[in-house]
Structure formats: C-alpha cells, structure tokens
C-alpha cells in the first residue's frame, strides 16, 4: 500500500526522472576586472550520450571564463566555493574559442557561487528572476504541447531540460528548452519564454 501511495503522489517531472539525460536548471553569471564568467548547473547522465536512453545521473557544474585580454600562453588555476564546499584545480582552454572552463561534480543549489581565477575573485549569481517559471513548469508546458508526437507516444526517448541563453536573436535573455530525443536522434522540442510561458518555437 505504501508503495502505491508513493507512486500516486508523484506528479509532473517526477514520473519521468529516469528518462532525463540532462536537467540544467540554472545559469549564473559574473564579472571582475579581467574576466567575465558564467556557469551552468544541474544533473545529467553519466556517461553523457545523445542516444535516446538515459543513464544514471550525477550532479554537475561547468564554469567558463573569458579573459578580457586573451593570451593563449597563459594557464589559469581556479578555486570555487559551491554550496559551502571549496574545489580547486586547473582551467582547461577551449580548443577553438578564447575561453577556459572547468567542471565539478556538484550542483549549485543556492543561486550563487564564488570563483577565484588565480588571485582574482568573481562572484556569480543566478540569471533567474522571481518571474521565471520553474523547470518543472516548463517541462509540463512542453509535454502538453508535444504529447501527440510519435517520439513521445513510442515511450522510447530521453529528455533534455535546459535554461539557455537566447538562441533566436540578439535581444538577450534566456529561454527554457525542453526536448525529447529517440535512439535515432530524432527530436521534438519546444522553446519557452520563461516569464510569459509563451512557446516561441516548436520542433515536431
């Protein structure tokens, strides 16, 4: 009986947890004298592979810095405080862009974090406002819009839920991106404006 009651209490995204390949529910940003910085955080499958099947999940946080004066010969070390825990290591340079990044196995739950690049400190805070709908609400909105698709009807798919920077134009801002991907990488997805809940783009 207790198992039945637990299952019946599940709603929305909880029912689909095992199908989630990536749940990226926050973006953080900050700036210092010599760097701009951003971070994305949440949980995702490990190993991460777009193949229609979600693996076991683990927390993650990826921090990226952009030096205001880029010098490819320079290497940087970081210290980061996330949820009160300190992490340290070396930044990795992007092979094509003028950026450096690192990843830790932790999910930033507070909406803010501190990153030190060598001896320079950057305070990062969430881009979300009180007007943003939650990732769960974005998922429910997407599922309602796409529920008739063949991918979802098949039941054989993995789910991506991401807060992303504006992919539509140069106006800035952020959107919720929710996608269902099958084993052939066929995708149905929506792009949702996070304050109005308007679906601004659909892929079916």
Image (cartoon, rainbow, N blue to C red):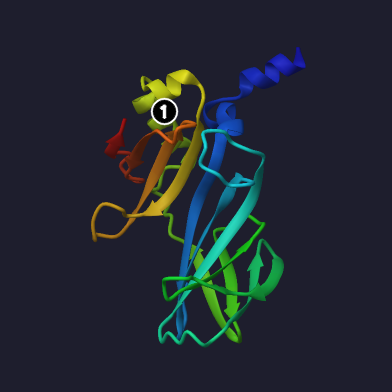
- Residue visible at 41% across and 28% down in the picture: 143
Q: Quadrant of residue 79?
A: bottom right
Residue found at the very far top of the displayed protein: 1
Dot 1 falls on a residue whose secondary structure is helix
Q: Quadrant of residue 75?
A: bottom right
Q: Position of residue 136 (x, y in %)?
A: 49, 37
Quadrant into which the N terminus falls: top right
Which residue is more in the foreground, 70 or 166?
70
Q: Quadrant of residue 98?
A: bottom left
Label 1 Cα crowd, 10 Å radius (few <14 / some 14-19 / many 20+): many
- Residue visible at 53% across and 77% down in the picture: 122
Q: Position of residue 108 (x, y in %)?
A: 60, 57
Count of picture labels: 1
Q: Is residue 166 above or below residue 156?
A: below
Quadrant into which the C terminus falls: top left
Q: Is residue 2 above or below residue 27?
A: above
Q: Is residue 108 visible?
A: no
**Disc 1: which residue:** 143
- Residue visible at 38% across and 48% down in the picture: 131
Residue found at the very far front of the displayed protein: 184
Q: Position of residue 23 (x, y in %)?
A: 53, 44
Direction from residue 52 to residue 119 in the image, left or right: right
């Amino acid at each position: 009986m207790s198992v039945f009651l637990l299952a019946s209490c599940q709603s929305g995204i909880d029912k689909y947890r095992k199908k989630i390949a990536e749940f990226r529910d926050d973006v953080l940003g900050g700036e210092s004298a010599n760097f701009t910085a951003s971070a994305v955080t949440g949980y995702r499958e490990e190993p991460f592979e777009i193949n229609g099947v979600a693996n076991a999940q683990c927390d993650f946080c990826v921090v990226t810095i952009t030096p205001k004066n880029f010098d490819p010969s320079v290497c940087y070390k970081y210290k980061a405080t996330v949820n009160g825990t300190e992490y340290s290591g070396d930044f990795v340079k992007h092979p094509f862009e003028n950026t450096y990044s690192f990843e830790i196995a932790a999910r930033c739950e507070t909406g803010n974090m501190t990153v030190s690049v060598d001896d320079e400190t950057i305070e990062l805070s969430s881009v979300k406002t009180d007007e943003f709908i939650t990732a769960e609400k974005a998922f429910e909105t997407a599922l309602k819009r796409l529920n008739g698709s063949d991918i979802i009807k098949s039941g054989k798919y993995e789910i991506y839920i991401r807060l992303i920077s504006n992919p539509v134009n140069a106006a800035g801002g952020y959107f919720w991106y929710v996608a269902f991907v099958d084993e052939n990488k066929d995708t149905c997805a929506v792009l949702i404006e996070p304050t109005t809940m308007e679906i601004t783009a659909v892929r079916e």
